[in-house]
């Protein structure tokens, strides 16, 4: 399971090095195989270990392509899905189309969200964190029955 936020740099080719704390797990459990696609509801990318992605694909495959919303979801996630293999230095070269979609600059944030990572432009990440904090503190958020009984 992935957690924490790491500030990383993209090199001139669009590569970033996966932090060492995740690298060994990805190499031993996933043979360094990952899938990156666009996030459908925020200006970031989703990076999945291959085993997690297979579960996403199976769920997407069960959706009816006659349903316009399901077809859009399939098109967005599968159409942008790009396979990656960690190189010998633990780096991933992000496709220009994915970098453009997320508006990535030289500084990015890799954010662990249990079964996947989000990849954000660092400035956008900080803006999003400020907005999320303000919304939570102000109580201006949508009701969610799943969180009604959640406590920390």
Image: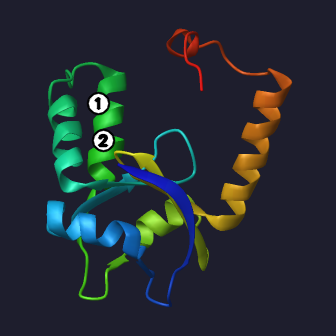
Left or right, 28 with reference to 137:
left
- Residue 88 at x, y percent in the picture: 24, 88
Q: Which residue is mark 1?
A: 71
Q: Is residue 146 above or below residue 108?
A: above
Q: Write the residue at 22% across / 20% down.
A: 66
For residue 65, say whether it is visible.
Answer: yes
Tell me the element at label 2: helix
7 lies above or below 44: below
| Disc 1: CA contacts within 10 A as few (<14), some (14-19) or many (>=20) | some
Position of residue 76 measured from the top left corner of the image (x, y, whole percent)? 36, 43
Given residues 104 and 18, the one toward you in this image is 18
- The residue positioned 16% from the left and 61% from the top of the image is 30
Mark drawn on residue 43: none
Alpha carbon distance from label 2 to label 1: 6 Å
Q: Residue at x 25, y 76 (%)?
A: 86
Q: How is the image coloured?
A: rainbow
How packed mark 2 is, by other alpha carbons closer than 10 Å (few <14, some 14-19, many 20 or more), is: some
Q: Secondary structure at mark 1?
A: helix
Residue 2 x %, y %: 40, 52
Residue in view at x 34 percent, y 45 percent: 115
Q: Which residue is mark 2?
A: 75
Residue 45 appears in the rendering? no
In which quadrant will I find the C terminus? top right
Image vertical order of residue 117 relative to residue 122, above or below: above
Asked whether the residues under the numbered discs 2 and 1 touch, taking CB atoms below 8 Å apart as contact, a structural biologist would say yes
Lateral position of residue 119 relative to residue 36, left or right: right
């Amino acid at each position: 399971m992935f957690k924490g936020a790491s500030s990383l740099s993209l090199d001139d080719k669009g590569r970033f090095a996966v932090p060492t704390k995740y690298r060994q797990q990805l190499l031993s459990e996933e043979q360094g195989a990952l899938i990156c696609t666009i996030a459908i509801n925020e200006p970031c990318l989703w990076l999945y270990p291959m085993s997690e992605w297979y579960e996403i694909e199976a769920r997407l495959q069960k959706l009816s392509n006659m349903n316009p919303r399901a077809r859009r979801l399939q098109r967005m996630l599968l159409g942008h899905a790009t396979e990656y293999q960690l190189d010998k230095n633990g780096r991933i070269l992000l496709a220009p189309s994915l970098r453009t979609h997320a508006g990535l600059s030289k500084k990015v944030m890799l954010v662990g969200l249990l079964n996947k990572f989000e990849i954000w432009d660092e400035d956008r990440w900080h803006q999003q964190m400020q907005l999320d904090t303000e919304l939570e503190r102000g109580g201006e958020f949508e009701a969610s029955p799943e969180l009604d009984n959640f406590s920390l």
